[in-house]
Image (spheres, helix red, strand yellow):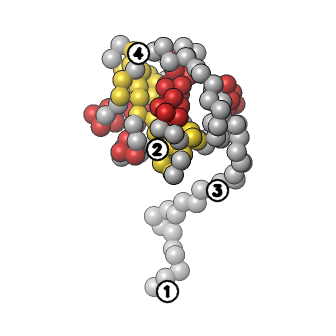
Amino acid sequence: MVCETPVPGNEDQVFRELTEADVPEMFALTTLTEPGPFLPRTIELGSYLGIHDSGSLVAMAGERLHLTGFTEVSAVCTHPEFRGRGYGNALLSLLISRIVKRGETPILHLRAENVTAVRLYERLGFNVRTRLHLAVVKYGAASHHGDGE
């Protein structure tokens, strides 16, 4: 999805920039919510913002891939017990605003069946650019690669 005409959203949430010290909580939240690929060093690729409740990270979003003129919005997720409070909208709105102020276009990818996320992104000005079909291939430890041995 591409956000060529951003729609102002609600940025009225208390958030903070996440750092490497937050990675264990970030990794736990992305493991729980499965927003897409997030590994312990992903934070090194761009800035990430988080919303905390009672000292715990309950929502986050950030920037990952940077291409000439484009920045990918990444790891947008909210703990299931804290959904419906506008956290995703606020974090996305702030990220979109920052990206646009740099003269870049926000982009992202997601599964088409994630209808809730698609609706949120569309409300903020994202449109489907293209649909891709992906396959994940894994090799197990016991796999033989035909190396002639």
Q: Earlier in the sequence, mark 3 or mark 1?
A: 3
Q: Do the residues labelled 2 and 4 touch (CB within 8 Å)?
A: no
Q: Which mark is residue 131?
A: none
* Residue 14, placed above or below residue 122: above
Q: Distance between the residues labelled 3 and 2?
A: 21 Å
Task: State left or right for residue 25 relative to residue 84.
Answer: left
Find numbered disc 2 in the image and state the secondary structure of the residue it sits on.
strand
Q: Distance between the residues labelled 3 and 1?
A: 27 Å
Q: How many marks?
A: 4
Mark 1 belongs to which amino acid? Gly
Q: Do the residues labelled 3 and 2 touch (CB within 8 Å)?
A: no
Mark 2 belongs to which amino acid? Arg
| Residue under the point 54% across and 46% down | 70
Task: State left or right for residue 93 relative to residue 122.
Answer: left
| Residue under the point 30% across and 37% down | 20
Q: Distance between the residues labelled 4 and 3?
A: 38 Å
| Residue under the point 65% across and 32% down | 5
In the orientation shown, which residue stands out farthest toward the bottom? 148
Q: Do the residues labelled 4 and 3 touch (CB within 8 Å)?
A: no
Q: Mark 1 points at which residue?
A: 148
Q: Name the residue under label 3.
A: 135
Q: Name the residue under label 4.
A: 14
Q: Distance between the residues labelled 2 and 4?
A: 22 Å
Q: Earlier in the sequence, mark 2 or mark 4?
A: 4
Q: In which quarter of the image is residue 111?
A: top right
Looking at the rendered image, the disc whose residue lies closer to the viewer, 1 or 2, is 2
Report the front residue among 63 and 100. Answer: 100
